[in-house]
Image (cartoon, rainbow, N blue to C red):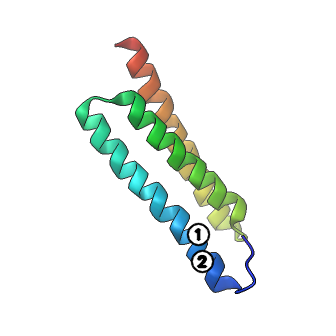
Amino acid sequence: MSHPLGALADNMAAYAIYATAQSGMRRAYTLIDAGDLAAAANEIESAAHAAEVLARASTELDRIAHWRRVADARQHFVDQLKAEKAAA
């Protein structure tokens, strides 16, 4: 992310992506509680994509590694939900 306003705008954009993903994760947990595994998987998949975007936009190696771990964990969760739904 690069913006003419500099680092502040970049940080605000990253926070917006992060906040949207966290909101999606909260919706996913609500959907899991309601038994809607397919919709929950979609929400988590979107949150995983957001983590990938943050990893690609990060310039610090530790942040890149962090966001890649988050994306991998979320994708693993999606795979588990899809397998559970298929088994049901």
Instruction: Left or right? Give the position of 43 relative to 26.
Output: right
User: How many numbered circles does the render carry?
Assistant: 2
Instruction: From this view, report whether residue 1 is shown above or below residue 33.
Output: below
Question: Do the numbered discs 1 and 2 sit on residues whose CB atoms are within 8 Å?
Answer: yes
Q: Which of 77 and 12 is in front in this view?
A: 12
Instruction: From this view, report whether residue 72 is shown above or below residue 54.
Output: above
Residue furthest toward the left? 34
**Quadrant housing the N terminus:** bottom right
User: What residue is shown at x 45% (from left), y 28% (from top)?
Assistant: 80
Residue 28 position in % (x across, y down): 36, 43
Instruction: From this view, report whether residue 60 is shown above or below residue 49.
Output: below
Q: Which of 66 and 3 is in front in this view?
A: 3
Q: What element carries label 1?
A: helix
Instruction: Left or right? Give the position of 2 relative to 42.
Output: right
User: What residue is shown at x 51% (from left), y 63% (from top)?
Assistant: 18
User: What residue is shown at x 43% (from left), y 15% (from top)?
Assistant: 86
Task: Name the amino acid type tagged 1.
Answer: Ala
Task: Name the amino acid type tagged 2.
Answer: Asn
Disc 1 target residue: 14
Residue furthest toward the front? 4
| Label 1 crowd bin: few (<14), some (14–19), many (20+), radius 10 Å | some
Q: What element carries label 2?
A: helix
* Measured Cα–Cα span from mark 1 to mark 2: 5 Å
Disc 2 target residue: 11
| Label 2 crowd bin: few (<14), some (14–19), many (20+), radius 10 Å | some
Residue 40 position in % (x across, y down): 39, 36
Residue 70 position in % (x across, y down): 54, 51
Instruction: Left or right? Give the position of 81 relative to 5.
Output: left
**Quadrant housing the C terminus:** top left
